[in-house]
Image: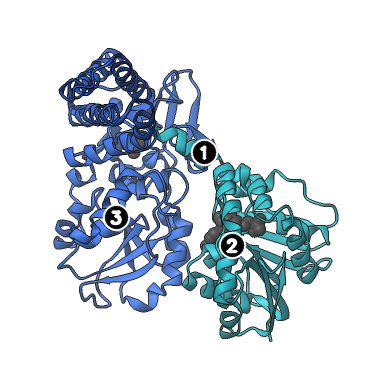
Amino acid sequence: MSSFVWMKVLESTPERYDRGISMLSGGRIGEVYQRIAEIAAVPARRVLDIGCGTGAVTLACATRGAVVTGIDINAEMLDVARAKPVPEGGSAVFLQRAAAEIEDLFGEASLGAVVSCLAFSEMSVEEQDYALETALTRLVPGGVIVIADEAEPATGFRRLLHRLRRLPVVVATYLVTQTSTRPLAGLTGRMRAAGFAEVTQERMLSGAFLIARGRRP
Amino acid sequence: MKLLDFPAYLRDTAFRLLPHRARTGLFPIGDPGPGAPVLVTGNFTLTVRRLRDVLAGQAAWLLVVNSKGFNVWCAAGGGHLTHHDIISAMRVAHLADKVSHREVILPQLAATGVERRAITTATGFETRWGPARLEDLPAFLGRGSRVFNAERFMRFPGWERQEMAAIWYAPALILLTPILWFALGPAAALAGSAGLVVMVATLFAMLPRFNPLGRWRLPILLGFGLFGALAGWGLLAASGGATLWPLIAIGTTNLIGTGLLFMDLSGTTPWYPSVVNTGANPATITLNEARCNGSGDCVMVCPRQVLKMNGRRRKVEIREPAQCIQCGACIVQCPRDALLFRYADGSTVEAPTIRNTRLNLLGKRRTLHR
Ligand SMILES: C[S@@+](CC[C@H](N)C(=O)[O-])C[C@H]1O[C@@H](n2cnc3c(N)ncnc32)[C@H](O)[C@@H]1O
Ligand code: SF4
């Protein structure tokens, strides 16, 4: 088949992203979004959502009254985000910026929380480290960081089992929505290395999802 | 190319429309010191491999930016390679600590999506356009990073046309060969596939000899279709399998092939604009002369040599409007927003809109907001 058929499919991804991610998580991704907001968002707190995509986490935090900025490098994803209604009481602004451009938007110690969901796994390790290091300096002391991403079981055999079980969903989701994710490794260690304190992690969605959090000392 | 790279080369060319991601970051070529030039590129595996090949023996830094695995031209046009990606890569690689100078060399074909001034504002690095084609890089570096005018022009040599031909027939073969094999046997499958490949390969070889946007394009394409069918039929006859259904199947295959090519052959070349969306309402590149201050930024990025600087008047002139492929690079780069597209229906699209729109492969501009 020719170019346009393929590209047409690939390029409509942003509109299909929400459906794709819902499929991948068996319809339970909303629980993750809520959990992130529960940890990070309180009324009037300044929150940054890195790699906000279609804005799910940004809006979940805004619903709790936070003043949220969602940044994403992909203008099309942001267009989908901007089309969604902003909840009353909170505020949400979406800007096209890369994770490495946080320093251009926020001064030192100007954010109450930094959140990021399923975006770190799309960055190179060097990029993740850079984002962690800048996020640290932009947070107020005591400010919280929450990073959620797909995770794999820690041991070899269970990991294999997990991959096999997931394969049909991954293929089906890719075919329908061209959305996929890949698990993130070694995150909490790198958060500590970047200077975060009280780094802990919890698992959700039967262990398939990892939510790591920490604080600026 | 190293022999070991050949399988990856085949994958990258045949499935060029899918992303193939190379590692991002700052890589030394040869033994670069802090004074060596920094060349920016996207992370399409084929490009990175080719760059390493042509740059062998040089001393330079290669900054591989996340273009989501697409080549620079498509990535920039489609919104997958912007100044945000370049700023990111420069910072993440701590470029400012690695080199003593403050300049990066950008690929000219990224000009549809990359705004140079944003890079300078964010990083303090000056930027400069390199040549349009990577094989001109050694000469470019040899003369102290100066581009000759001819190197801004998009060539489309025979071997590259064959690579483009492959993106048409490779996916077709993957679908078609098994179907023909199951339905009509191996002889029909091989003859049908070979006929199609011969047809598309010949067509791309002869591309400089006809105009895929001209009045005669349909009869010409049908001629190629017939030629492909004849090739297939000949093979079939030679193998003694020339029965009715295989003959029909091969004829139909080539007909469908030319039909698909008819839809947007021009859009798979760097010589013509894609016409799927603008065929009925073509755009013309237009200069608002009062705004032009003769900076020449547009001339530096046009891959079709449409624009010329009139040094005496200090104004740009649109010399070859018919050569324009409507990529929008000149419009994006003009510091005075002096260039625009004027459509046949009288409407115009100006610089701020072009900067906020991305082309999809159908040549359609989708408006985005920032
Ligand atoms: C899988 S989506 C997640 C979207 C959203 N956070 C969610 O959970 O639904 C990942 C997003 O990260 C963005 N992204 C990837 N790398 C980025 C970077 N370096 N800077 C900013 N955004 C990035 C992508 O554009 C994409 O929209
Ligand atoms: S004149 Fe046409 S081809 Fe040249 S840069 Fe402008 S839009 Fe592209």
- In the picture of the structure, the residue carrying the numbered disc 2 is A119
Using the rendered image of the protein, determine whether residue B214 is visible from the camera's viewpoint.
yes
Q: How is the image coloured?
A: by chain
- In the picture of the structure, the residue carrying the numbered disc 3 is B8
Which residue is more in the foreground, A5 or A23? A23
Callout 3: chain: B
Q: Which chain is blue?
A: B
Callout 2: chain: A
Residue B164 spot, x, y in % from top left = 28, 38
As helix, strand or loop, the secondary structure at mark 2 comes to loop
Give the spatial CA distance, label 1 vs label 2.
Answer: 22 Å
Beta carbon of the mark 1 residue lies under 8 A of ligand 1: no
Residue sitting at 41 percent across and 37 percent down? Answer: B338
Which residue is more in the foreground, B294 or A209? A209
- In the picture of the structure, the residue carrying the numbered disc 1 is A9
Q: Which chain is cyan?
A: A
Q: Amino acid at mark 3?
A: Ala
Using the rendered image of the protein, determine whether residue A104 is visible from the camera's viewpoint.
no
Residue sitting at 84 percent across and 66 percent down? Answer: A43
Which quadrant does ligand 1 occupy?
Answer: bottom right
